[in-house]
Image (spheres, rainbow, N blue to C red):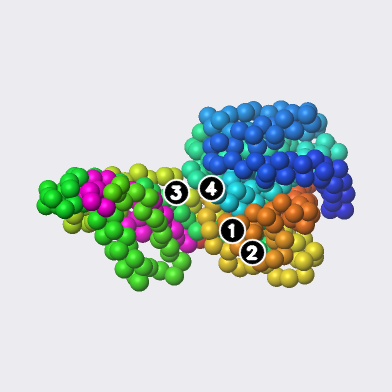
Amino acid sequence: MLVSLEKVIGETIDDASKDLRKLSLAIHDNPERAMKEHKASELLCNYLCSKGFSVEQQAGGLETAFVATHTSSAGADGLCLGFCSEYDALPEIGHGCGHNLIAISGVAMFLAIARVLDVCRVPGTVRLFGTPAEEAIGGKIKMLDKGVFEGSDLLMMLHPTAGYSGSWHSQCSLSMVIEYFGKSSHAAMAPWDGINAGSAAVVAMQILGIMREQLKPDWRTHGIITHGGSAANIIPSYSRIEYTVRTGWSSDLETLRERVLRIFSAAALATGCTHKVTEEFAYLDNQDNQVLGSMYEDLMRKEYDVPPISDVGGSTDFGNLSHRFISLHGMFDLAGTGVPNHSEEFAKNARTEEAHKRTVFAAKSAALVAGRCLVDTDFWNQVKRAHNEKGNR
């Protein structure tokens, strides 16, 4: 059974490898930031349409999101498997998180499982979700709220990093913008007439720095002042902070959120300013599935002969999906260099032939895991039990 799956999946992804490489390079060489990924989305949709798949664009009301769907020739009365592609870039350094590779890994797994459904005459459906804005506003969260993922029995995606893992527990993350409003005045002639919004931002950042001494080991807070004033001789009437808080578990996120919100309020009170906090969607911690993750890691270990990494850090909007659906967020080693994500060197490595080769292998491995869910009832029952037990932790 597994040998047959391996052959179908391997041949399908190998046949598409050259096309996938072209897509990857085109996305990498034209980096587009969150919600502006028009070229990347169009490239992927056009490719999928050229292969005869049904593609819904602007999924969930997001201009650059899409959903491609294929139903087995044996009918739809089976599992509905979904894969996610990301394709947004980072400011300044482009694809420093390898989303060009995440894009094609999703396509590769989708093609492979579509082929498995037809060749093996297994009833079911496979969908590829084009998910924009992972690095900024959490496109998957918006799509989740719009019901785009409903009906999915299993959701999977792959992500390059400095190692591999099938059990990545990401950090929860909540980003917010804090604005302080004061009163401008001449800093030399009448400073007493001013209310310094810049000072409010500085006070807030100082208290936040002091607070870190009392944070749990897996909690993080970090941010920047994006506007503190316009001229040194003018008391600034406006300031702006971009800030992020992270926790290891969703149950802790509200506690840390309330603590930092009190600090932002205290800075306003101390300086006489008013303030406004605008919060983005919270990225929840990724909930791994031990059965899916173990099989993925076993397949990866055969290739790399090293243990999986245990601590990567970072956050993802896929975590929100993992709280609702059975899921696997597989990590794979970008290029064997140990270079961290969100760096210029990582972006350069994401364009290499070696990175493409590793992406293809990871896609084959993850597709084998998904394929086994389709054809092995006992295995799928184990996966479901692991998911239910996870919900009781």
Mark 1–mark 2 CB contact (< 8 Å) = yes
State yes or no: residue 355 in magenta: no
**Which label sits in the foreground, 3 or 2?**
2
Amino acid type, mark 1: Ser
Identity, as a three-letter code, of the amino acid under mark 4: Pro
Q: Which residue is mark 4?
A: 91
Q: How crowded is the residue under tag 3: few (<14 C-alpha within 10 Å), some, or many (20+)?
A: many
Q: Nearer the viewer, mark 2 or mark 4?
A: 4
Pointer 2 local density, CA inside 10 Å: few below 14, some 14–19, many at least 20? some
The magenta stretch is 232-260
Label 3 or label 1, whichever lies nearer to me, is 1
Q: Do the numbered discs 1 and 4 sit on residues whose CB atoms are within 8 Å?
A: no
Task: Identify the element where label 1 is drawn.
Answer: loop
Disc on the earlier residue, 3 or 2: 3
Residue beneath disc 1: 343
The x, y position of residue 44, in whole percent, is: 70, 35
